[in-house]
């Protein structure tokens, strides 16, 4: 069973860059699309963007200017970079895998446990 | 990207059935058969319980069922149990431009 584990700083200062890593174990990154999804405290889910094993990426139009999602096949890791953060970016950040191999339908069968990132000085 | 519309809350007594709606547009829910539902308990990650409108992943009880009519999808929980008390989110594929949109979530209370 594939497992996803997010890691990174829990506190980021305003205007800085939020950087998180999702390590995939029990399976390969190959063949799937991987997304980052966030959830502000007490609020709903927001899709941030996806990356494929081949490096094809797409981002939420509202965040596109600030987001990059690199993939490192050698380490079986997907990362998230969100620049110029503000308090509005405070959220639990999840990495998630599509339910179907080669599928790109926005249906997420595997999720990491999530990591809380607080933006504060 | 506009969120899909869900009622903020729903409730039912043990053994009863509850239906949660998820309303979108012809650009998302109505345009594709890629609607999924997630169950989220406090402090936990969301769990996929329905995909492709009405399919259940292995291990999800058949008490959970999904359907769609026009621009509105629905999740029905039959034979309510105490452990069904959670937040439920829908989402839908929204095409190559917007990709995916989520509903605002529904808090299900088992009375």
Image: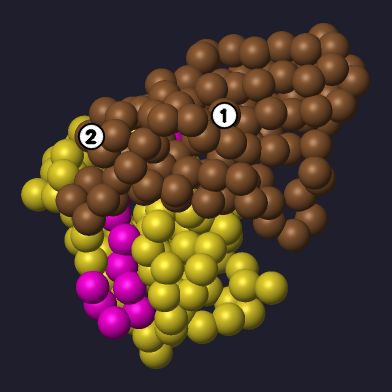
Chain colours: A yellow, B brown
Of A46 and A114, which appears nearest the observer?
A: A46
Q: Is residue A82 left or right of residue B57?
A: left
Where residue A55 sits: x, y (%)?
25, 77
Where residue B68 sits: x, y (%)?
52, 34
Residue at mark 1? B74
Chain under label 2? B
Using a 10 Å C-alpha cutoff, classify the residue at mark 1 as few (fewer than 14 neighbours), some (14 to 19) or many (20 or more): many
Q: Quadrant of the C terminus of chain A?
A: top left
Circle 2 SS class:
loop
Q: Which residues are magenta?
A: A42-56
Using a 10 Å C-alpha cutoff, classify the residue at mark 2 as few (fewer than 14 neighbours), some (14 to 19) or many (20 or more): some
**Residue B55 is one of the magenta-drawn residues:** no
Where residue A1 sits: x, y (%)?
69, 73
Establish if A4 lies above or below B3. below
Residue pictured at 56% horizontal, 40% vertical: B37
Label 1 to label 2, Cα distance in Å? Answer: 21 Å
Residue pictured at 48% horizontal, 75% vertical: A101
Residue at mark 2? B1
Residue pictured at 61% horizontal, 68% vertical: A3
Of A58 and A7, which appears nearest the observer?
A: A58
Of A21 and B80, which appears nearest the observer?
A: B80
Chain under label 1? B
Residue lying furthest left: A65
- The answer to whether residue A28 shows anywhere in this view is yes
**Residue A43 is one of the magenta-drawn residues:** yes
Circle 1 SS class:
strand
């Amino acid at each position: 069973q594939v497992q996803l584990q997010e890691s990174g700083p829990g506190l980021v200062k305003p205007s800085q860059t939020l950087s998180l890593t999702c390590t995939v174990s029990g399976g390969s990154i190959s063949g799937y699309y991987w997304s980052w999804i966030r959830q502000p405290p007490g609020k709903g889910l927001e899709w941030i963007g996806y990356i494929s094993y081949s490096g094809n990426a797409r981002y939420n139009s509202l965040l596109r200017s600030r987001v990059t999602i690199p993939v490192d096949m050698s380490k079986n890791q997907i990362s998230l970079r969100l620049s110029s953060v503000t308090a509005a970016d405070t959220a639990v950040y999840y990495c998630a895998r599509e339910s179907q191999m080669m599928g790109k339908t926005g249906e997420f069968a595997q999720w990491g446990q999530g990591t809380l990132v607080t933006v504060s000085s | 990207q506009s969120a899909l519309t869900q009622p903020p809350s729903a409730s039912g007594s043990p053994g009863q059935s509850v239906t949660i709606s998820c309303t979108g547009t012809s650009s998302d829910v109505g345009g594709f058969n890629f609607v999924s539902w997630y169950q989220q308990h406090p402090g936990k990650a969301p769990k996929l319980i329905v995909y492709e409108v009405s399919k259940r992943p292995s291990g999800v009880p058949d008490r959970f069922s999904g359907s769609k009519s026009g621009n509105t999808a629905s999740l029905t929980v039959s034979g309510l149990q105490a452990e069904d008390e959670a937040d439920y989110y829908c989402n839908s594929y929204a095409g190559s431009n917007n990709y995916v949109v989520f509903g605002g979530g529904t808090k299900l209370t088992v009375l």
